[in-house]
Image (cartoon, rainbow, N blue to C red):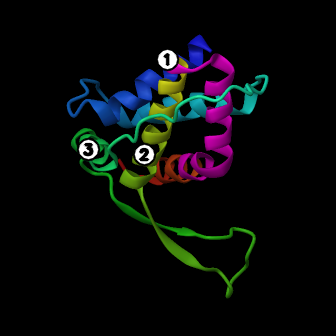
Amino acid sequence: MNELRKIIDQITEFGINPKVELTNKTDVLKKLLMRIYLEYLNVEFEFDKANYNEEPDFDYNRIKQNIKSNFPDFGWYSKVIDSNQMEPNVEIVVGDELDDLTDIIKDLLAVKWRMEHTSENDALWCFKFSMQTHLEQHLVDLLKRLKERKE
């Protein structure tokens, strides 16, 4: 749990602080995303049946502005919806690096809040549920996009 918390703190810093002082932020981000993905693949917990208050609503627009300040070259990209489809049936959609990272950070802030205000098992459940239902695709898309960047 301590390692997960450390990684979450480092990733969410890009959405909380508009001026993260790091050299080569993109490489640091790629490593952090890989580490959070590994944590997800290895997460184990016991379901916590207690009823807790919901986490606060973290401001999407403010997080996105801070990310834009830290990664001013982030923007739109195209992707294939279903890589199992072969031409001519391939369907292309637009993705957004800013939105991907904003959603990742917003959900990780919710996990962090649960770490501080509920229980370890509840926080781990939230992390796993969020990754399974929402974040994994953003994370994979963003990692693929960062890999393909010409920097």
Residue that label 2 marks: 101
**Residue depicted at x 50% and y 29%:** 32
Q: Which residues are magenta?
A: 116-139
Viewer-side label of 2, 3:
3
- Amino acid residing under circle 3: Arg
Toward the viewer: 50 or 8? Answer: 50
Queried whether the magenta region covers residue 21, the answer comes back as: no
| Secondary structure under the numbered disc 2 in the rendered image | helix
Q: Earlier in the sequence, mark 1 or mark 2?
A: 2
Residue 127, label in figure: none
Decide: marks 3, 1 in contact (CB < 8 A)? no
Residue that label 1 marks: 116
Residue 62, label in figure: 3
Toward the viewer: 73 or 53? Answer: 53
Q: Position of residue 138 (x, y in %)?
A: 54, 51
- Amino acid residing under circle 1: Glu
Q: CA distance from mark 2 to mark 3?
A: 13 Å
**Residue depicted at x 64% and y 17%:** 120
